[in-house]
Image: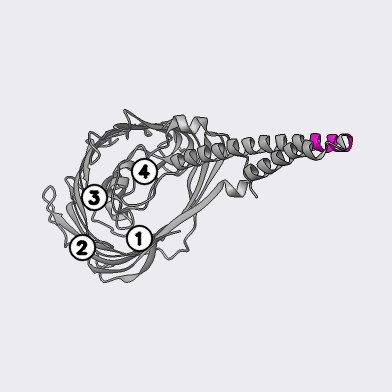
Amino acid sequence: MNGSRMAMVLWTVALAVPALAQAQASPYDEIRGEVAALAERVGRLEAENRTLRQRNDDLERRMAALQAPAGEPPVVAAASVAVPGTAPGAGPEPDLAVLESTPARPATPWYERLEVSGYLFGDAYAVLEHHDPAIDNQTGFWIRRGYLTFDADVADEWSARLRFEVNSPGDFTTNAKMNPFVKDAYLAWKRSGQELHLGLSSSPTFEFVEAFWGQRALEKTPLDLYRMGSSRDLGVAYRGSAQDGRVFYHAMLGNGSGDGSETNQGKKIMAGLGFRPTNALAAQVYADYEDRPGSTDRSTLQAFVGWAGPRSRFGLQYAVQQREVESGPDDEAAVASAFGVWRLMEEGTLIVRYDRSFDGYPDANRIPYLAIADDMRFDLAILAWEQRLQKKISLIPNLEYVRYRDTEGRQAPGDDLHGRLTLYYQF
């Protein structure tokens, strides 16, 4: 019996009691009073129940507003761009008015505030052709990267990350065990789309470009691959967005030692400024200056523009780095790159990329997994197909071809051709 019917019955009983009590009014007066009080209490309880139901409905609406829809295509973080075909990301940011009006949640234990994630990719490879006879025709298996990441909420607006990386040497000669090292270790303050990172964190050098490329398991982006900058540095970084995400920025002051320790008095300053005039079109300009020991300072300029549609994306990049040399004329390294990614099937994606090095690199033979000839101009072409076996598992057969060009009177060596079958999975 619900509250309304119970109240009606009690009121009926209360009205009937005086008629029954005409002959014996005194014994029933007390009962009639108790019945009336009980009916009044039931009425109050029913009113309170209605109020609680209304509050519950309101809370459910607020929770629904805070939940971000998941699905393809994902949206990369504020300093990035929507890139279809990459790992799923978060949806639109929650309404701040709703967020501020939502009652504070009770404290949760530490293990509910800690998220563990990671990924791993490696290859079965064959060096089909190589300018170095010692590397030519080599075959084998290696792990090119493994991540294990711990993210934790420390307090309101504060979070922390600790990430470990492991990989094979990739130099075709070293026979060593894979030793993990710290890749990220920072404390982050976040508010209204702005972030302050303290510690070892991502540098602005190519984070945005890599997110747009979206195929790190296949190959690094040019500045990373050709050792023109580092993906991490130890220092202070600030990033965020404005104009509803149409403008985004990332600046950092660091040691200039990557994920290693400080070894000199100089520092490195890096800054990237991006624009998103439409949801599909994005561009970024980047510059850095590194104060190195002696007369070996370096400065870098980079420009990138990309377009992302529902089933494809394209990118165009140019970068130049000035390198001071203590003994001899200063050096310059410049590279241009273009790529296209097409999702031709529901679970199948075609990837094409072309890089052109205008000057060569003095330590190119140390590039892991490729070992390009030192100080030689070259072109790199990549052709790959990504087949998604599951949502978080991909198999990527690919070819990387390096064609050398005559450089300052020196004849080009023979070309390089690498064949790989790459396995990539997330957890």
Report which quarter residue 122 is drawn in. Answer: bottom left
Q: Residues within 10 Å of mark 4 (few under 14, many from 20)?
A: some
In three-dimensional space, the C-alpha distance between marks 4 and 3, rounded to whole angstroms, equals: 31 Å
| Residue 280 x %, y % | 23, 41
Would you place residue 383 above or below residue 332 in this image? below
Q: Relative to residue 380, is residue 317 depicted above or below? A: above
Determine contact: label 1, label 4, CB under 8 Å: no
Between circles 4 and 3, the one closer to the viewer is 3
Q: Which label number is shown at residue 310?
A: 3
Dividing the picture into quadrants, the one containing residue 384 is: bottom left
The percent coordinates of residue 314 (x first, y second) are 20, 48
Q: Which residue is mark 4?
A: 230
Looking at marks 3 and 2 on the same chain, the residue that comes earlier in the sequence is marked by 3
Instruction: Give coordinates of residue 408: x percent, y percent.
Output: 12, 47
Between the residue at mark 2 and the residue at mark 4, the CA separation in whole angstroms equals 25 Å
- 162 inside magenta stretch: no
Q: Nearer the viewer, residue 192 or 288?
A: 192
Question: Label 1 amino acid?
Answer: Asp
Q: Amino acid at mark 2?
A: Asp
Q: Residues within 10 Å of mark 3 (few under 14, many from 20)?
A: some
State the extent of the magenta-drawn residues as a range. Answer: 26-33
Q: Amino acid at mark 4?
A: Ser
Residue 24 point in image, percent of width and height: 88, 37
Q: What separation in Å lies between label 3 and label 2 (alpha carbons)?
A: 35 Å
Query: Compared with residue 40, is residue 409 higher up or lower down, i.e. above or below?
Result: below
Type of secondary structure dominating the magenta stretch: helix
Q: Secondary structure at mark 2?
A: strand
Circle 1 residue: 171
Give the mark nearer the N terminus: 1 vs 3. 1
- Residue under numbered circle 2: 416
Under mark 3, the amino acid is: Pro
Crowd rating for badge 1 (residues with CA inside 10 Å; few <14, some 14–19, many 20+): some
